[in-house]
Image: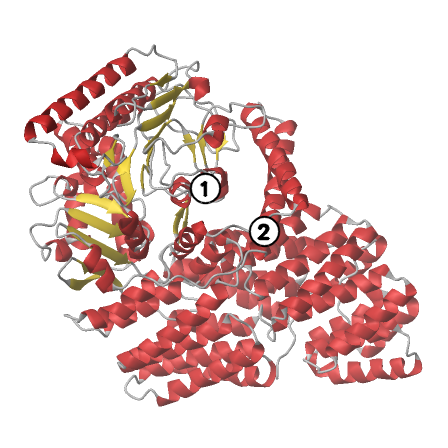
Amino acid sequence: MRLARIVVALVVVLISGEARAIADLWEAPPTSIAECSARVRRASNVGSWYCFYRLSFEHRDLIPAVVAHLERIRAREPRNALATFAEALAEDLRGGDNTLALYEQAQAEFRRRGDVEGELHVAAAVVGHASWFGEAELGAAKLARGLVLAQQLGDPDALAYMYVHATELALRTGDYGRAEVRVRQAEEQLTPAAPPWLAYRVPHDWGRVYSATRRPWRAMQAYQRAAAATPDPVHRAFSLQGCAEEAVRLASAGELSMEEAERHLDEALAAARLGVASYHTGGELPTRMLRHALRGPSPEGVREVQAVLERGRATQSFLQITAARLLARFAAETDPRHPGPARVLTDEALSEARSTGNPTWVPLAHLARAHVEWRSGDREALGRQAELMLDSVDRLRWNQPRALARARTSAEWAFAYELLAGWLLDLAGPEPSDGAVEPAFATMERLRGRILLDELTRAGVAPPTESPDLAARRADVLASLTRGQQGLLRHEGGAGREGLRQQVEAAEVALSELEDEVARSDPRSAPVSVATLAELQAALREDEALLSFQLWRPDISLNAPYPAGASWLVVLTRGEVFIARLADAQVLEPKLALFRSLLVRGDSGEVPAGVRLREALLDRALERLPPQVRSLLVVPDGPLHGFPLDALVMEDGSPLGGRYAVTTVPSASLWLRWRRAARPVVGPALALADPDPSAPPGRDRDASRWLEQLRLPSLPEARAEAAAMVEARGPGGALRRGPEASERWLKTSDLRPWGLMHFATHAVVDETEPERSALVLAAGHLEEDGLLQPREIAGLDLGGKIVLLSACRTASGELLQGEGTLGPVRAFFRAGALAVVASPWPLGDLETRKLIDELSERLASGLSLEHALAGAKKARQEAGAPAVAWAGLQLHGDGSVVVSARSTARRGSWAVGLGMLGLALFLVGAAGLVFRARAAARAVPAGQVGTTTASSR
């Protein structure tokens, strides 16, 4: 296999004085073998022998001579571990077959001599080698040894060094969750005395992690920090190349100007030339390809990319595969009727991708071939390539043991799903059959909410048994995390507060590692099959329609150099499937943002803006719906997550929600699961309200981010609202206010008696670290912090319940394309809830109470949740409340559920024979029981826990 080994500072001496010597060496590269030999004569150590690696790195044409020189030395000195190590590094750069054997010889000799430093560097080098070739087991074994050696040295920078290599291994093997854990660990260990190359590598690797998990702004900022941290021109070229890639992605998505993207490209090209870095992945050739991908096919572009392809064939698989895919795009765009040459190029890319063992390159080659088939108009061939690409991404995604890592992997590949689904629908025709729509629909369903679907499917499977040691470690870490968060809630500021932040962050890293250990011991299941169109149609009622949005935006990169995609709306009713072409995301997003801004401000301009948006998003669907449809099940995409569709304006000026009940679902497959499990939700209400009534009253149920000191007002209207909900739901309800609304009570109580869970409190939402979001409760115990966070929510037993989150921004969180919003709503679904009502924006205390009171009355009348909420919103709208007062509460999940406070215990067979008179008497008696129970509930003094219980019938 022909593959050039690309290494950036693969091995660098770290310890004390030698670390500084190596940093100087990297800043002053050698120019000849004689110069390296002179350095070795002056001081024979890892740093001086490393000179031969640096020489080979900067002058690839000298590698044969360097290897020959080192072989002569080894012939004279067979036990010279340093010479053996230097030769292994040089061989690794050119992909030599004896590379691993040389590494093993060097490591064995260092171990025999008791040279811990030498053995550490060999272990790190082998981890780097394994990373490039995707050999996870080899890399893991050498990494474990390297960490032991670093601990023996007692130098934090030695640990940071190994964690940097661990990050590389995780990235190269597609384990992005572990990569994020490892780079955090490297950052924690790094000291101010660390060599400059190591201080550079940590932010650079942060950029790579952010890029891999589709956080382009954060990636660009990290790359900029790395470029500013290094004096070395080669390292700077690497980081500015990464910065340019993220700038192009942002520009193609409309978030950065094209001029700014070109500026970043110019800066990266200049840095690459200065760094003499045209032969590796951070250099001039990839940047040139990226520029031509942005500009499109031209004679100059074809010539330059063809030259890169020739260079790649001779030296480097990355260049070969990337250039072949880009040239295939140009050929397909220039002459779509003759796809032969483009197909040959994609075949070359696929063959080379398979030979490398890199799991991320194979699906990219399939995507390139799919693009060619789309351009040629061959729908069947496109479908075959789409299936191959999706299967390869599924394998990559399911290689991640932790759910969050799988979700981030999905987000990284969302561009491919969106492109394929758009191309498939484009070839389906204006009035496609269900069979033509199915592949595109299934493509998006294989992306959407897949991790949540898998978690729910596996909910009945017993989790792996934790060892006593692991359980004890978890308890210690959680205790440390709780203590840190308790301190942050109380501390006024200053240096102590920074120490608490560091304690929390360290505990989060440790918890991530523990969860990773548990996940890797959990038997993996196959991905769950997604719902078919026929299954969904059979589950829909006559008055329901499902609207599945797919909003595409240009996102040009070397992975996806395709500027042509499409946005669509797929509509399902019980009797029909049809599609509608939509404007792309970069066109719709400013309009969506404007309407939401007008809505929140109460600006009268919301009406015409709402009309225009409704026309753009929904008109072609609404005009074709059967007249009996009154419920819309919406699968959002991109900027539609959290958007109040029911506030859009109809022709007569009324809100869309006045005609249709709107429910949001993460995916059609998840909705089908909930619908099949749906039955009347039985049981009264449990409400937890206003955990700190002694605080001064406030108007909003909002809070700052949790890492800042929380100054939360009391919520008197929330107390009244919760009492009304418990009363309306009938006997057996429970209202817990003030200190009784505690985290400890909720986590340790049997929640089965209640069918509806109502939280009327504050919430804090972190949109970058979703596991930090929380509902704010009283602590209830010294071991609790009063922050009910997603991992704790998911541990509750809420099977089959409705959850009402009457708190600010609980429908917000980190938005991962495909998977959806990571926040409290998702956590409640993981706990088993069938439906969750939540808001993506701040809620006013008084207006929220009025809306919830309307909802309570309608639920008590026996309406389904969707129609009860729609009716409550309509009542507030007719009462003159602004849209911001009612549009915030949104329904997620299955809104068809009906909440019943009565027991479902079977009556005896005698009940079947009751006559009308007996039935009437029975109902009168039941009404009396309810009336008396409600009277008892009203008699509970304010500020106490009120619990009313009726005997089971």
| Residue bearing mark 2 | 518
**What's the residue at 76%, 54% (across, down)?**
158
User: In the picture provided, is 295 more to the left or to the right than 507?
Assistant: left
Eyeballing the image, is 701 above or below 473? Answer: above
Q: What distance separates the C-alpha of mark 2 from that of mark 1?
A: 16 Å
| Residue 9: percent from left, percent from top | 70, 65
Residue 592: x and y in percent read: 26, 47
Q: Position of residue 697 (x, y in %)?
A: 37, 16
At which x and y percent is residue 493? 59, 25
Using the image, determine if residue 894 lies above or below residue 202: above
Check disc 1 and give the amino acid type.
Ala
Q: Which quarter of the figure is the N terminus placed in?
A: bottom right
Crowding at dot 1, Cα within 10 Å, few <14 / some 14-19 / many 20+, comes out as some
> Local crowd at mark 2 within 10 Å, few (<14), some, or many (≥20)?
some
Earlier in the chain: of badge 2 and badge 1, it is 2
Residue 299, quarter of picture? bottom left
- Residue 794: image tag: 1
Q: Amino acid at mark 2?
A: Val
